[in-house]
Image (tube, rainbow, N blue to C red):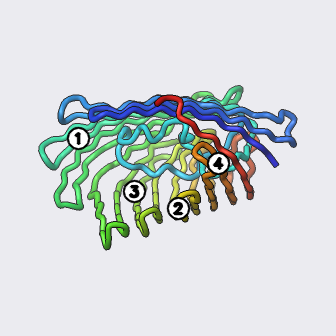
Amino acid sequence: MYSDLRGELNYRTTSPRRTFGADAATTLHYYPQLAQAILADYGGGVGLETALGRRTRLSMSQGFTSAQSYQPTLFPALPSGMVGSDLLAVLPSGTVGSDPASTTGDALSRLNVNTFTTMFGLTRTVGRRSSIELGYDFRLADFTGRELDLRAFGVQGRFSHRVTRYAALRLGYGQRVAHYAVSSPIQSSLIHDLDLGIDYNRTFALTRSRQTSFSFTPGSSIVAGREGRRYGVAGNVALLQRMRRSWTARLVYNRGVQVVDGFSGLFFSDAVSAGVNGNLSQRLGLAFSAGYSTGSIESSGQGTFGSYSASAQANIALSRHWALSLEHFYYQQRFSGSVALPTGVPGELGRQSMRVGLRWLTPLLP
């Protein structure tokens, strides 16, 4: 049994040439079964996307989060494109890099962790069909008093040329480096991302309210680590179905290499997620989702992992400023093999939670 209290401040301003956003959030968790019953999480961030002339756009963001509890991220974020293509969507109010299970408020381990993220992106159109994209990202996870710190950064470059209405040729290369402070000397992993292939994105419209969108983005990765080189296929496939004016269903598959805070090795993962959401009326909204992730871990030991999640949520508007939310959540994870787990993280865990929340929303500026 637990309770939490969350507050957020969100600011957005948009013009034809630029978009700016700033967010701040804090959450107080109350666990009566713990010696320290009250835990606090907070974070903030800013993001800017602006035009530099007619053909060039610059995107950047900076975020910070601090938490008194820890839960590993086993569901990889599904990329919408290059780093920097949608930076305002990853400000800390959206809980950057959070695992779906973290929405339950359940803390797996009492580890204090501070996270800093920085992202830059530059896009320039070349002619009517081509574009060049450059990106940089940095992430620091600082576990107070523990040798679990992670420092990771990546650079990417890509050239895209649209060959048909629905397909684009993509040629690119990226490099990611992860430094783990789990031992002395500091261990490192190097990931080469080969961005070679065809992007396919098409929408089939039966009616204005019923549309089907399909996208396919292939790729590959070469990992150079302590165990030598490893080659893998990467990419994602997404299917989006708009069934009615307010109802949407989605199915997404992602395969790739993850860097996970708290672990001294890379995660080679396959993940699939599905969801349906919409409104039954002007005051009642429903959302259902499920996800599954599995793969292997390469660190000082070899191991595998698997995680499942499912949720059902209802949001009821009581008035202009007040809303009631009801949610049921199920989560399960399992680690096997000789992988060293962070302090307090169990090898196998299954949890269910029920949440009832009351929200108050009001604009601070006209």
Lower position in the chain sequence, tag 2 or tag 1: 1
In this view of the protein, which residue sits in the foreground, 207 or 239? 207
Crowding at dot 1, Cα within 10 Å, few <14 / some 14-19 / many 20+, comes out as: some
Circle 1 residue: 132
Q: Secondary structure at mark 1?
A: strand
| Spatial CA span between label 1 and label 4 | 37 Å
Q: Which residue is mark 4?
A: 103
Q: Nearer the viewer, mark 3 or mark 1?
A: 1
Q: Which comes before the other along the chain, label 2 or label 4?
A: 4
Horizontal side of 330 relative to 299 (left or right) equals: right
Q: Residue furthest top?
A: 145
Res. 235 mark: 3
150 displayed left or right of 204: right
Mark 2 or mark 1, whichever is nearer to me? 2
Q: Position of residue 46 (x, y in %)?
A: 46, 29
Q: Earlier in the sequence, mark 4 or mark 3?
A: 4
Residue under the image location 41 percent in, 66 percent down: 242
Q: Which mark is residue 364?
A: none
Return the disc, 1 or 4, that comes first in the chain's sequence. 4
Hey, what amino acid is under mark 1?
Answer: Ile
Residue for point 35% across, 43% down: 82
Residue 81 is situated, as x and y percent measured from the top left of the image, at: 36, 47
Judge whether 73 appears above or below 114 on screen.
Answer: below
Q: CA distance from mark 2 to mark 1?
A: 39 Å
Q: Amino acid at mark 2?
A: Asn
Which residue is under mark 2?
279
Mark 1 or 4: the one toward you: 4
What kind of residue is marked 3? Gly
